Image: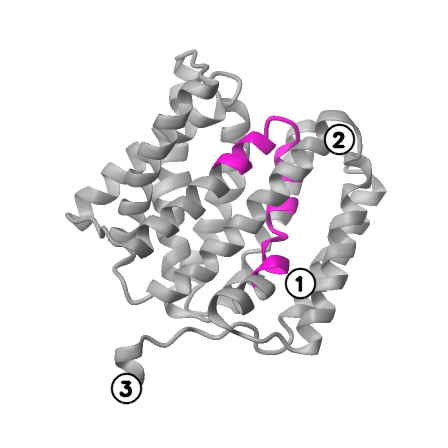
Amino acid sequence: MKEIKFLIPYVVFTAFSYFFVKDGLYYASPLIFMAMRYLIAGLLLLAFSRRLILTKSLLALTLLTTTSTAFWAYGLLYVSPSESAVLSYSMPLFSLPIAFLLVSERPSRVEIAGIFVGFAGVVLYGIPLLSGFTLLGMVLTLINAVFWASFTVFYRKIKDQDPVAVNATQFILGSAVLFALSPLDFRLHFTSTFLIDLLWMATLGGALQFFLWNSMIRISRVNRITVLAFSVPIFTIVLDVFMTGVLPPVYSVAGVAVMFTGIALSRFKRGISFVVPQRAAKK
């Protein structure tokens, strides 16, 4: 698999990122934490791309990405890193209907069946979370998954753009949005531990993570990459068990199994195809 050289570091960096964000949220509110993360990551990528792409498409993509990030971070206030990982990676369950609406791609019957099975897994996994703030965290994280699916599908429209410049633009414009909203929920206690969390999320868990994701999408089918990336929640669950020594409930284990079955089923046949740029289609 030619994408394996990108997949392995992506899985490792992304899995650890859930724990760095969870820790960082003890010292900063989600909006200011992610605003600082976006700004540093954007400036790092801008140093390589040396340009920004200021178009309506990039503005729309930025809003989708920023919204996804904000809901993800707020969800992590109430759920564990492994719970956040599993719920976030319900994203493919939403990508098929969103792709139908955005790029007029019709899912097959097998893919539709996979969606229903996958949602059953999400519900089963969420049974232990149906109480108090944990339920709120589950809902916020699932909303994040919807917006992640949206900007993942949206990436298909601009896949011919330089991924470094695209991500640099996303991060810098997104930081402006997050900084503008941060007075609504401002909390920041700057410590050495917070600095470590921030630097991880801006570099390995930010600029590099997004670059690796874009690189995989550019060289391989998105449905294939999506399935391969489901090793992230598996690795995150293993890390969580190793760090806490607490095994997940039976409902959670069964929910993960059903959810992954649905995702595999929805991708059994060809999912959403790449959108061919118009100028290429005319050749």
User: How far across and how far down the image is residue 43, in percent?
Assistant: 23, 37
Q: CA distance from mark 3 to mark 2?
A: 57 Å
User: How far across and how far down the image is residue 76, in percent?
Assistant: 59, 31
Q: Residue, x 43% and y 14% (percent of image)? A: 188
Q: Earlier in the sequence, mark 3 or mark 2?
A: 2
Q: Give, as a three-letter code, the residue at label 2.
A: Val
* 156 left or right of 257 in image: left
* 102 left or right of 162 in image: right
Q: Give, as a three-letter code, the residue at label 1.
A: Ile
Of residues 279 and 16, the one drawn nearer to the viewer in this rendering: 279
* Cβ atoms under marks 2 and 1 closer than 8 Å: no
User: Is residue 12 something one can see in this rendering?
Assistant: yes
What range is drawn magenta here?
70-95
| In front: label 3 or label 1 | 3
The kind of secondary structure the magenta stretch mainly shows is helix
User: How far across and how far down the image is residue 244, in percent?
Assistant: 68, 28
Q: Which mark is residue 282?
A: 3
Q: Give, as a three-letter code, the residue at label 3.
A: Lys
The picture quadrant where one finds residue 66 is top left
Q: Earlier in the sequence, mark 3 or mark 1?
A: 1
How would you rate the neighbour count of disc 1 (Cα within 10 Å): few for under 14, some for 14-19, many for 20 or more? many
* Cβ atoms under marks 3 and 1 closer than 8 Å: no
How would you rate the neighbour count of disc 3 (Cα within 10 Å): few for under 14, some for 14-19, many for 20 or more? few
Q: Residue, x 70% and y 58% (percent of image)? A: 260
User: How far across and how far down the image is residue 63, in percent?
Assistant: 40, 44
User: Is residue 199 something one can see in this rendering?
Assistant: no
99 within the magenta span: no
Residue under label 2 = 246
